[in-house]
Amino acid sequence: MLLSWLAPILTRTPLGLLLAATTTAITASAQWPQFRGPTGDGHATARNVPLKWSSSENVAWKTAVPGRGWSSPVLADGKLFLTSAVGPTEGPLELAAMAFDAGTGKLLWSTSVFTNESTKTGIHRKNSHASPTPIVADHRVFVHFGHLGTAALDTAGKVLWRQTGLGYNPVHGNGGSPILHGKSLIYLADGSDAPFLAALNLDTGDVAWKVARKTDFPQKFSFATPSVFDLNGAPVLIAPASGFIAAHDARDGHELWRVRHEGWSVIPKPVFAHGLIFAGTGYETATTIAIRPGGSGDVTDTHLAWSLRRGAPNTPSFLAVGEELYLLADSGVLSCVDARTGTAHYQERACGQSSASPIFAEGRIYLLDEQGLGVVVEPGRTFKKLAENPLGERTLASYAVADGALFIRSEEHLFRIGH
């Protein structure tokens, strides 16, 4: 159902719409349909991506986002989609899916998907009740609220199905985003005990498969987004966990191999380049590891290509560009390393404390720190900062990208940067 508070928002004209009066409409072909973009690795094919902006310059529109949430915006067919938890700080929350017009910033609809009665459950200070990023595919929007449920809506805001039968104790709240493979929506459910991964049927929400994590690691909770790579002609799901990185057959979930590590509360989404899988190990001491895929069972001693502690991120995901791998540490230090060997070319402070994942667009690397500072860096083995763009609002979500535009979600607003 549409939220009761939506009508007055739809009937008044916000300042953002005045700013957007001459905004060029987003073309129907522009797509940023999931966390980290079309290919799930932070690479954008968009043209004329803005280089410079501020809170008052090169802002096409700025519109208020009801509620609280850190899901990143996604873009399809001229609409931006995100999720939010609407309601009092203590008390029932409406877990909502929302759509905004990408050309004007107008809130088109907001649908209450779930009601969360237990908002006093533990949640990390950098988390929210609406942190996983939605996915748009086949004119449907898939939203995930971790242990609180998963749902599909049509792009007009009508709920098509809900799945609430796979609860678990997430410790710090929901975090990792789902991904799509074939006719399944796949996500990781690494709670305080009995962690598992699951695939839901896209058409019905029914459980297609569910696989338990086999682990004796004491700190079992993590918040990672998985990835699927085509390895030797087979779809392989790379699923980070506390204590290990596992590879599963994406068709039925059975485990193929794993690499052990000593970390927990793992967050970064893995990427694949130059025949290597790059993944993180989380807390206490974050480490970036490069894995040669293949083998069977525990392949730690045979398939770990290299590892690097200095500059490894706890939160931001990895970015592979050309021959290099870029690591943005939570501290704001950017590392450029040789992707094949892990040899560092530079490690430089690029911005402040960071949670958003970097992207590659228009031949440039874009960073976004937690104070809303957008930093643009030239790729290559020498650190060169091209621009610093202060937005002045707290930001943990990652960019969405389209021709001529960047979309940024802050604590209270959604921005379109560019024309």
Image (tube, rainbow, N blue to C red):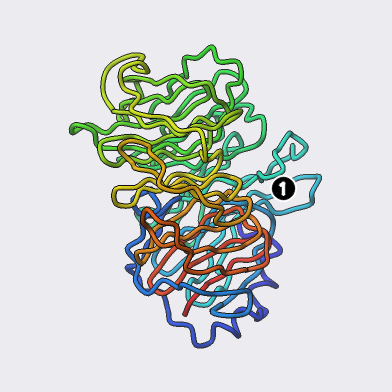
Q: Residues within 10 Å of mark 1 (few under 14, many from 20)?
A: many
Q: Amino acid at mark 1?
A: Leu
Q: At 66% from the left edge and 81% from the top edge, which residue is drawn? A: 15
Q: Dividing the picture into quarters, in which one does residue 255 lie?
A: top left
On screen, residue 385 above or below 270: below
x and y, in percent, of residue 49 in the image: 41, 71
How many callouts does the rendering have? 1
The residue furthest right is 90
Q: Dividing the picture into quarters, in which one does residue 374 lie?
A: bottom right
Is residue 143 found left or right of 372 in the rendered image? left
On screen, residue 35 above or below 292: below
x and y, in percent, of residue 247 in the image: 35, 26
Residue closest to the eye, 99 or 395: 395
Residue closest to the eye, 33 or 40: 40
Is residue 125 found left or right of 189 in the rendered image? right
Is residue 41 found left or right of 385 in the rendered image? left
Q: At 57% from the left edge and 77% from the top edge, which residue is drawn? A: 61
Residue closest to the eye, 350 or 187: 350
x and y, in percent, of residue 408 in the image: 55, 63
The residue furthest top is 216
Identify the image quadrant of the N terminus. Answer: bottom right
Q: Dividing the picture into quarters, in which one does residue 293 lie?
A: top left
For label 1, the residue is 93
Residue closest to the eye, 368 or 402: 368
On screen, residue 413 above or below 160: below
Dot 1 falls on a residue whose secondary structure is strand
Q: At 75% from the left edge and 53% from the top edge, which residue is drawn? A: 87
